[in-house]
């Protein structure tokens, strides 16, 4: 069960659940009761920024409020697809764009916003141009880029590197050489919330790129037959299993969830030396890690090259932005409220500052001076540099693919890391869903 943020606040204030639910007054998806509805991910500090934008909008529009409800990452992915398929979607649909958005657009479940953008050119001009690729289907824009640009970053704990007398890796060979050094010190080489599956996938995203270049995965997107069996793909799949077999990850990683931030805690409590994770991880470690970030103990870098690989070392993977779509099933009044929120409530100055304050780079242009003045200036500028200098910025695979193909991918990624499928079996299973 997902409770609205206001329900949780009521419970925190000491109200029983029944009273807190009554106090919330949320009418649920598709039934605004005078307002629009909006679902998005929970988890701090990102949840607080999104909630703050909703609160500011509601304060300015007391007669046309937005009622928000939050969900954990994995639960949300299931819940939102089910709700949309049943015609019970919230008015505002938060998502990652890409293949999932394409399925919604092709099924007529979200509105085409192209003409709305033509009427509000300032909204489009205020976003990173690179953020619109994952919002576009067959030349039409179906979503408003929001939140922050989130490249995947290789984080490392400077304290444990010093303890081991080691230097950050500059190549894949360096990574493999560090594994026995940290294991000998009783420190896991890498933290990993493997139960969440998409965390495992990030390793493949980089290895495919660094070994074969972005063309290898692009062939999957383009629907080329047997694209997953490309020799460079098999090499990448083999490399990650070699890392698993070398005890490169924390013991029991398959039972650790990313939603609980347990993988983050392994890094800042010195139980793990490194972690591959999204740019949002910085804000989590800053909020939960005590003096870990303020003391300068957190290091970060783009993923290193693989010797002999074809991918450009500047290439990035991750989320070019997050996206807000408009449910085609919403009433005209709900759509009117949502569009006003898109125009005047998303990525306004206070929200931009809040993203920067928690260590994120918002997708709004012209923030360089704010980034430089932030207490997290170094990380933000590294993050901004990764995102802006990347010759190719590959969208997270589970968002770039259709929901059907993405689920097969995630299932097989988990099996690959558990060593229960071979690279060749993985490729065959994924080839079977190309183009679905």
Image (cartoon, rainbow, N blue to C red):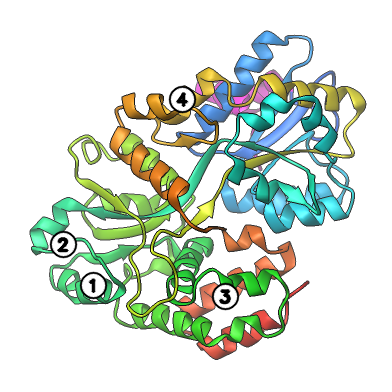
Q: Range of the magenta residues?
A: 1-25
Q: Is residue 430 left or right of residue 14?
A: right
Q: Are marks 4 and 2 in contact (CB under 8 Å)?
A: no
Name the residue that disc number 2 marks.
Answer: 167
Q: Are marks 1 and 2 in contact (CB under 8 Å)?
A: yes
Judged by its main secondary structure, the magenta piece is helix
Residue 306 part of the magenta-drawn span? no
Q: Nearer the viewer, mark 4 or mark 2?
A: 2
Name the residue that disc number 3 marks.
Answer: 216
Residue at image point 44% right, 72% down: 207
Crowding at dot 3, Cα within 10 Å, few <14 / some 14-19 / many 20+, comes out as: many
Q: Nearer the viewer, mark 3 or mark 4?
A: 3
Vertical relation: 45 (above or below) 388: above
Q: Quadrant of residue 54?
A: top right
How many callouts does the rendering have? 4
Q: Position of residue 217 (x, y in %)?
A: 59, 71
Q: Earlier in the sequence, mark 3 or mark 2?
A: 2
Q: Quadrant of the N terminus?
A: top right
Q: Position of residue 204 (x, y in %)?
A: 48, 71
> Rounded to the nearest whole Å, what is the CA distance between mark 3 and mark 4?
37 Å
Kind of element beneath mark 2: loop
Q: Are marks 1 and 3 in contact (CB under 8 Å)?
A: no
Q: Are marks 4 and 1 in contact (CB under 8 Å)?
A: no
Residue at image point 15% right, 58% down: 161
Q: Earlier in the sequence, mark 4 or mark 2?
A: 2
Residue at image point 40% right, 58% down: 314
Q: Are marks 3 and 2 in contact (CB under 8 Å)?
A: no
């Amino acid at each position: 069960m997902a409770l609205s943020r206001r329900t949780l606040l009521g419970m925190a204030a000491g109200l029983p659940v029944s009273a807190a639910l009554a106090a919330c007054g949320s009418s649920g998806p598709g039934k605004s009761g005078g307002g629009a509805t909006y679902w998005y991910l929970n988890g701090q500090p990102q949840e607080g920024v999104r909630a703050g934008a909703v609160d500011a909008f509601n304060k300015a529009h007391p007669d046309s409020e937005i009622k928000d409800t939050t969900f954990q990452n994995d639960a949300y992915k299931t819940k939102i697809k089910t709700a949309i398929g049943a015609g019970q979607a919230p008015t505002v649909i938060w998502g990652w764009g890409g293949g999932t958005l394409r399925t919604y657009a092709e099924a007529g479940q979200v509105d085409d916003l192209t003409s709305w953008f033509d009427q509000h050119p300032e909204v489009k001009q205020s976003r990173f141009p690179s953020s619109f690729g994952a919002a576009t289907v067959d030349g039409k824009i179906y979503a408003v880029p929001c939140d922050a640009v989130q490249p995947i970053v290789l984080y490392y704990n400077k304290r444990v590197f010093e303890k081991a007398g080691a230097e950050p890796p500059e190549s894949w060979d360096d990574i493999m050489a560090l594994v026995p050094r940290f294991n000998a010190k009783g420190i896991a080489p890498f933290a990993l919330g493997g139960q969440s599956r998409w965390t495992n996938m990030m390793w493949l995203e980089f290895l495919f790129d660094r070994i074969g270049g972005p063309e290898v995965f692009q062939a999957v997107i383009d629907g080329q037959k047997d694209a997953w069996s490309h020799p460079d793909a098999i090499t990448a799949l083999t490399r990650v299993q070699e890392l698993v077999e070398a005890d490169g990850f924390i013991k029991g990683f398959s039972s650790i969830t990313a939603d609980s931030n347990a993988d983050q805690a392994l890094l800042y409590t010195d139980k793990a030396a490194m972690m591959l994770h999204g740019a949002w991880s910085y804000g989590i470690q800053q909020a939960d890690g005590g003096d870990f970030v303020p003391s300068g103990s957190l290091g970060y870098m783009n993923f290193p090259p693989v010797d002999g690989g074809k991918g450009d070392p500047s290439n990035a993977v991750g989320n070019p932005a997050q996206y807000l779509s408009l449910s085609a099933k919403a009433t005209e009044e709900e759509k009117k409220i949502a569009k006003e929120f898109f125009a005047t409530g998303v990525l306004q100055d206070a929200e931009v500052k809040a993203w920067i304050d928690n260590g994120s780079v918002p997708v709004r242009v012209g923030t360089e001076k704010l980034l430089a003045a932030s207490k997290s200036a170094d990380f933000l500028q590294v993050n901004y540099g990764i995102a802006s200098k990347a010759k190719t910025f590959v969208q997270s695979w589970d968002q770039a693919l259709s929901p059907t193909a993405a689920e097969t991918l995630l299932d097989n990624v988990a099996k690959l890391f558990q060593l229960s499928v071979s690279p060749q079996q993985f490729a065959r299973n994924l080839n079977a869903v190309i183009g679905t």
